Image (cartoon, rainbow, N blue to C red):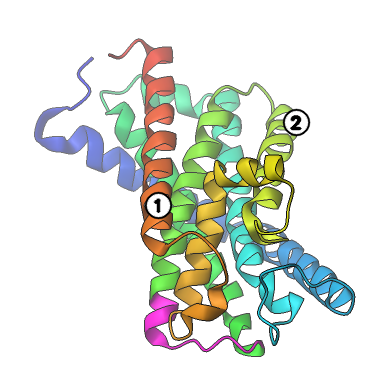
């Protein structure tokens, strides 16, 4: 079966259809919005307020509260939970036979991956944009340009996380197994990304773990875009150029793995 049917219909039509299907499913299940936003919100408030008086990681500017410091990490947590919720549908669609019916049609396997990932990423960015409104409760000097740059960078990180979720979900036979793997893999990635504490001041072995963690560059990139007006407040983090490069490579890697897995299972080369 060719991977690129005539006039591109086998790529763009399934991609657009699956993208729209993710949005429709979301509109019918409002609990996903509450789960993806409220849990990071509660975590952000409880940890930020509770630790502000007793915990000041090295590298935080003297006037910055811990609530403000962990805000970029909380933004990425919204993307993380949305990636988990949206890619659960991959497991459910395979179990219910929907995905098999899609794959027997003359459509591009790449279109299937892009449609599912773009759908999840769109939802992640929309929910992240809602959470971004809380920035006005902090002392972050944002303006329309920095907010737009933040949303754009969140879209890039969302692509990577949703692509990673798709790759993991494609190999899972049950939603329980998917949750176990995601919690075991993604939550530690987030915790060791600089979301809770900066790289400076940690043991050398942990610093190296954080340096090779791609989400470290996602959190740092969000810090750069949020503090575009006052870059010194972003702290001692990797440069924005490094963040953009690593996050882009992370997107290419996760999408590439997802396309490889779906083609290999269906015998498409």
Drawn side of residue 263 relative to residue 160, left or right = left
**Quarter of image, res 69:** bottom right
As rendered, which of 37 and 252 lies closer to the eye?
A: 252
Quadrant of the frame with the N terminus: top left
According to the picture, the residue beneath numbered tag 1 turns out to be 20
As rendered, which of 213 and 37 lies closer to the eye?
A: 213
Drawn side of residue 20 relative to residue 180, left or right = left
As rendered, which of 263 and 49 lies closer to the eye?
A: 49
Query: Could you say where residue 182 lies in the image, as x and y percent from the top left?
Result: 67, 37
Tag 2: Cα neighbours inside 10 Å, few (<14), some, or many (≥20)?
few
| Residue placed furthest toward the left | 7
According to the picture, the residue beneath numbered tag 2 turns out to be 176
Measuring 61% from the left and 73% from the top, which residue is drawn there?
A: 131
Measuring 67% from the left and 61% from the top, which residue is drawn there?
A: 198
Drawn side of residue 170 relative to residue 181, left or right = left
Q: Is residue 190 above or below residue 51?
A: above
Query: Could you say where residue 161 lies in the image, as x and y percent from the top left?
Result: 52, 46
Measuring 44% from the left and 86% from the top, which residue is drawn there?
A: 229
User: Residue 190 in magenta?
Assistant: no
Look at discs 2 and 1 and give the one toward the viewer. 2
Drawn side of residue 70 relative to residue 266, left or right = right
Q: Secondary structure at mark 2?
A: helix
Query: Could you say where residue 36 lies in the image, as x and y percent from the top left?
Result: 67, 59
User: Residue 145 in magenta?
Assistant: yes
Q: Secondary structure at mark 1?
A: helix
Q: Which residues are magenta?
A: 138-148
Quadrant of the frame with the C terminus: top left
Q: Is residue 217 above or below residue 59?
A: above
Measuring 83% from the left and 77% from the top, which residue is drawn there?
A: 52
Q: Is residue 53 above or below residue 173?
A: below
């Amino acid at each position: 079966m060719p991977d690129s049917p005539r006039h591109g219909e086998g790529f763009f039509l399934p991609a657009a259809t699956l993208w729209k299907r993710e949005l429709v499913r979301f509109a019918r299940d409002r609990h996903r919005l509450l789960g993806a936003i409220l849990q990071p919100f509660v975590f952000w408030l409880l940890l930020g307020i509770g630790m502000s008086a007793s915990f000041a990681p090295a590298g935080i500017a003297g006037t910055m509260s811990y609530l403000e410091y962990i805000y970029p990490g909380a933004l990425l947590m919204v993307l993380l939970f949305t990636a988990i919720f949206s890619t659960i549908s991959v497991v459910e669609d395979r179990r219910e036979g929907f995905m098999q019916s899609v794959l027997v049609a003359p459509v591009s396997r790449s279109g299937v991956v892009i449609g599912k990932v773009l759908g999840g990423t769109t939802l992640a960015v929309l929910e992240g944009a809602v959470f971004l409104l809380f920035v006005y409760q902090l002392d972050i000097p944002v303006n329309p340009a920095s907010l737009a740059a933040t949303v754009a960078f969140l879209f890039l990180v969302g692509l990577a996380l949703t692509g990673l979720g798709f790759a993991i979900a494609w190999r899972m036979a049950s939603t329980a197994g998917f949750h176990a793997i995601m919690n075991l893999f993604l939550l530690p990635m987030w915790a060791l990304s600089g979301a809770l504490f900066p790289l400076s001041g940690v043991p050398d072995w942990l610093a190296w773990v954080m340096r090779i963690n791609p989400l470290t560059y996602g959190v740092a990139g969000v810090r750069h875009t949020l503090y575009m007006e006052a870059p010194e407040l972003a702290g001692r983090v990797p440069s924005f150029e490094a963040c953009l490069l690593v996050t882009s490579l992370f997107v290419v890697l996760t999408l590439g793995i997802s396309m490889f897995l779906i083609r290999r299972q269906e015998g498409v080369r």
